[in-house]
Image (cartoon, rainbow, N blue to C red):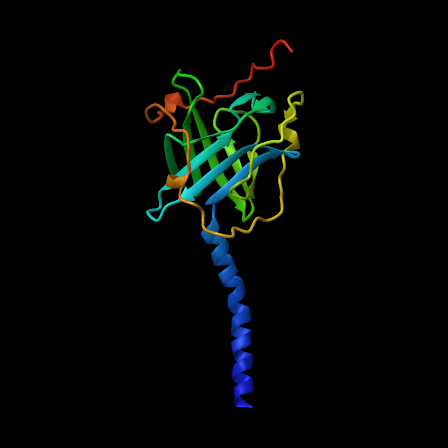
Amino acid sequence: MLPYMVLRILLILAALLLPARALANDHEAGLSGHWAFRIDDATIFVFTLEQLDSGAWEGAWTRPQEIDSNGAVFRRMSGQETVRPLAALERRGVVQLTFTGPQANGRRDVLQFSQQDENRAQLNYVGIPGDPYPLVRVAADTPLGPFDEVRIYDRDNAVIEADYVELAQPLEPLEGVDLAESEGAAATEEDEMPRITADFLDGL
């Protein structure tokens, strides 16, 4: 009788501890991982975020080499490049990455990430009006596209939920990833301007 009671108590304790462990694992995952901005069936951007043991953050941005966008719609996308940020910081649960702009004009792309739940996050692109971009967690090898060269992709059709992606192995250190380096000095507040502009559709 005694072994049965002991076994029953152990089963009850295991049931009580399981949710706590699951929550702890969810918390540990946090923003570290790979996040995609998708419109319908097309992946527009993929972001990699990694928190180091020191608490500092690193990141990367995989984006089309060619793109026309005003922040609300995207078109003429082709190619793929992955770039590192000039600076990364975290404040009150928001991770901010600053990238050099596409031209040698001193402008910067400032992207702010915050987590919504285990599989969803959002991106605030500083200087671009409108609601934050929804992001979904994806696998490390998620490619961009597919892109239709004659189609205009509307942010209103962005994917806000996706199937949960189980991370089968720890995130690969960014030091081991072949990335194009962002050039230029660290950004100042005056430099923080978006690379996509509101006038690209003028004349259409």
Q: Position of residue 146 (x, y in %)?
A: 62, 31
Above or below residue 120? Residue 186 is above
Residue drawn at the location 52% of the way across and 35% of the way down: 46
Residue drawn at the location 62% of the way across and 44% of the way down: 162
Instruction: Identify the residue at the far top of this view.
Output: 203
Above or below residue 39? Residue 167 is below
Residue drawn at the location 52% of the way across and 59% of the way down: 22
Q: Position of residue 108 (x, y in %)?
A: 42, 23
Above or below residue 159? Residue 152 is above
Please count the marks in the image. Answer: 0
Q: Is residue 81 left or right of residue 134?
A: left
Between 128 and 67, the residue placed more toward the observer is: 67
Residue drawn at the location 62% of the way across and 9% of the way down: 203
Q: Position of residue 111 (x, y in %)?
A: 46, 31
Position of the N terminus, as image quadrant, is bottom right
User: Residue 139 falls in which quadrant of the image?
Assistant: top right
Q: Position of residue 157 (x, y in %)?
A: 66, 32
Position of the C terminus, as image quadrant, is top right
